[in-house]
Amino acid sequence: MIRGIKNLIALCLMALLCSCAGVSFSDWHFPYMMEVQQGTYITEEQFKQLKVGMSKDQVVFVLGYPLSHYLFNKTRWDFPYQNYTNNSLKKSYSISILFDNNANVSQLSKTGDPLFEN
């Protein structure tokens, strides 16, 4: 009796392993994967408001505080943004703002994909 149960369990395990043999788990996806946005999303109107000579308070009013606020350099603020859809990167950009010794914007730069899509 016990031997028959062990054989039945072994047979079920073999059937389960054989049924999974053709599945490539790296290609398998869930039916729906949530879109993940990380960073600071900046609209075209916000970016157009940024000007050389603005104070830090004015930049905070337009964009908010950066994610890396004073992390590495007190005169540089970075605003990165990434958008993942179905586990792949769809959009990525970064806006960097450099300040002079008087805490006014001295340089604006943007890198990455186009910032604004209609």
Image (cartoon, rainbow, N blue to C red):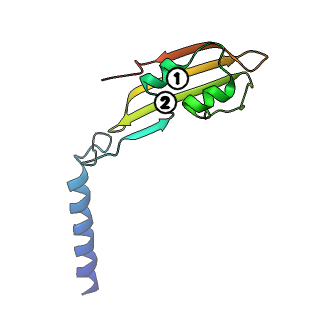
Numbered tag placed on residue 42 in the rendering: none
* Residue 104 drawn above or below residue 79: above
Of helix, strand and loop, which one carries label 2? strand
Nearer to me, 92 or 115: 115
Of helix, strand and loop, which one carries label 1? strand
Q: Residues within 10 Å of mark 1 (few under 14, many from 20)?
A: many
At x 24%, y 46%, the residue is 23
Location of the N terminus by quadrant is bottom left
At x 28%, y 48%, the residue is 30
Mark 2 or mark 1, which has the lower sequence index? 2
The quarter of the displayed image where residue 52 is located: top right
* Image x and y of residue 50, in percent: 55, 19
Asked if the residue at tag 1 contacts the one at tag 2, i.e. Cβ–Cβ closer than 8 Å, the answer is yes
* Image x and y of residue 16, in percent: 24, 61
* Image x and y of residue 70, in percent: 72, 31
Location of the C terminus by quadrant is top left
Nearer to me, 22 or 3: 22
Judging by the rendered image, the residue that carries numbered circle 1 is: 94
At label 1, the amino acid type is Ser
Numbered tag placed on residue 81 in the rendering: 2
Q: Residues within 10 Å of mark 2 (few under 14, many from 20)?
A: some
At x 52%, y 23%, the residue is 94
* Residue 110 drawn above or below residue 38: above
The quarter of the displayed image where residue 115 is located: top left
